[in-house]
Image: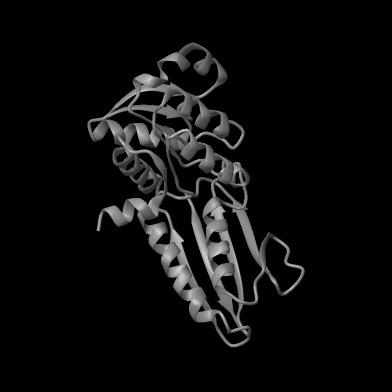
Amino acid sequence: MKIALLGYGKMGQEIEKLALKKGHEIILVFDCLEDWESDENRLSEADVAIDFSTPVSILENIYHCFDANIPVVVGTSGWLDNLEKIQKDCLTRNQCLFFAPNFSIGVNLFFDLNKRLAQLMSNREEYAVSIEETHHIHKQDAPSGTAIVLANDIIHHTEHKEKWVHEAVENPGELGIRSHRTNNVPGTHIVKYESEDDCIEIIHTAKSRRGFALGALMAAEWIIGKKGFFGMKNLLEAQI
């Protein structure tokens, strides 16, 4: 598999390392405007692009891939306000995009666990629910895309929560997400239900970036030859 890496930060480098071990080839790396100016016409040589860039560049990167008619795997977060438009354009133009706020297999199992717990706690208003996430200091968006997914799933399954807010909660209908940026933490997410008498927590802690890179490569291998808009649910269901 010939891969174009869009973004060459720590995640891009982790993907490169793992891809080479799996026998794939990194034929292009786009990490700045100069890279696009010199090599954009070669993008169509890749079998797939994998994007872990920045919220500022992600939309343009996706459309570059659409123009080159190659599938793109996106792990960059911080652009969810444009997700609906991108999905529509992907389908209209008969392109292929795989997006996940988190490519860790464990996190996606954690999503299911979170939904089930939210269902069980839906009518337990004596428990205050909150989310806390911690990442490395270089992460550019807050709250994390993973925390937003967790929050939206809780809201969907909980009658007394209407929206999530970042940091300060001002009324009972809000679900608070607290963000911490410290050192080199790959990612920790905590969902907490707390009453006056006890506390229930579910926690996912990433030990390294390898799990994210592995999931992204699995997605890249899976989408080659496909058209449409996909996510981790599609990939995991295909493996059953």
**Residue 204 placed where, x, y %?**
44, 61
Q: 140 or 217, which lies in front?
A: 217
Residue for point 43% across, 23% down: 68
Q: Is residue 66 depicted above or below 205 in this figure?
A: above
Give the residue furthest to the right: 170
**Residue 229 placed where, x, y %?**
43, 44
Quarter of the figure with the N terminus: top left
What's the coloring here? one colour
Image-quadrant location for residue 206: bottom left
Residue for point 60% across, 73% down: 129
Give the residue furthest to the front: 92
Q: Is residue 168 depicted above or below 121 in this figure?
A: above
Q: Is residue 104 visible?
A: no
Give the residue furthest to the left: 23
Q: 5 or 168, which lies in front?
A: 5
**Residue 166 placed where, x, y %?**
68, 58
Residue for point 33% across, 33% down: 17
Quarter of the figure with the C terminus: bottom left
Q: How many marks?
A: 0
Q: Is residue 107 depicted above or below 35 in this figure?
A: below
**Residue 138 placed where, x, y %?**
57, 40
Give the residue furthest to the bottom: 197
Q: Is residue 144 visible?
A: yes
Q: Is residue 185 depicted above or below 205 in this figure?
A: above
Residue for point 61% across, 77% down: 159
Specify whether 134 is left or right of 160. left
